Image: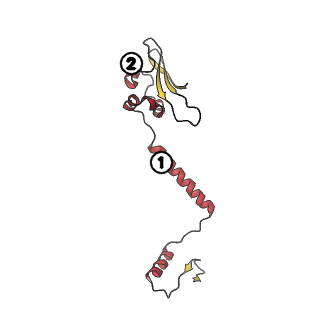
């Protein structure tokens, strides 16, 4: 094989009349394969992993829905962040909250708070239960917090 000085790519012998030889020459003219360094390959793998992780997180992000909240009390921890971030309960009356979230774990007519069980979120360490606590003032939600116990 001869080396072309201008393109620095491998030239195939011109005497080959086989189909595979013609195909190889054709590909070598069209595609110029870069020389990958090991650092480039590592960067490509890391970038691909980042794209895949971001895509999976985006498509699996949990959204709050009243039906899901009432249907699966043990997995409420998955959708409570969306409920808080959306400020859906902000300045709602106690009756409005009860119609959205249903009957709480702890409920007393004269109490200024409601407490909803959220279940156990996944954890590497000690698993603790979580609870959504809603504080009312003048029959309006003024504070929403998540407590662990």
The rendered magenta stretch, by its main secondary structure, is classed as loop
Query: Residue 123 magenta-drawn?
Result: yes
Which quarter shows the N terminus? bottom right
Quarter of image, res 63: top left
Residue that sits furthest to the front in the current view: 126
The answer to which of marks 1 and 2 sits earlier in the sequence is: 1
Left or right, 127 with respect to 19, comes to right
Position in image of residue 110 (x %, y %): 44, 11
Residue under label 1 = 55
Which residues are drawn in magenta?
122-126
Crowd around label 2: few <14 · some 14–19 · many ≥20 (10 Å): few
Can residue 140 be seen here? The reply is yes
Quarter of image, res 102: top left
Q: What element carries label 1?
A: helix
Residue under label 2 = 95
Query: Residue 91 magenta-drawn?
Result: no
Which quarter shows the C terminus? top right
């Amino acid at each position: 094989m001869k080396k072309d000085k201008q393109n620095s790519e491998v030239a195939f012998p011109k005497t080959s009349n086989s189909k595979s030889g013609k195909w190889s020459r054709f590909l070598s003219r069209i595609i110029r394969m870069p020389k990958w360094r090991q650092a480039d390959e590592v960067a490509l793998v890391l970038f691909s992993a980042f794209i895949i992780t971001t895509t999976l997180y985006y498509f699996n992000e949990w959204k709050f829905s009243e039906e899901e909240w009432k249907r699966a009390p043990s997995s409420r921890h998955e959708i409570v962040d969306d409920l808080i971030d959306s400020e859906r309960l902000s300045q709602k009356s106690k009756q409005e909250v009860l119609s959205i979230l249903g009957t709480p774990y702890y409920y007393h007519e004269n109490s200024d708070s409601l407490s909803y069980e959220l279940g156990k979120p996944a954890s590497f360490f000690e698993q603790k239960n979580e609870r959504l606590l809603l504080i009312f003032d003048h029959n309006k939600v003024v504070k929403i917090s998540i407590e662990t116990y």
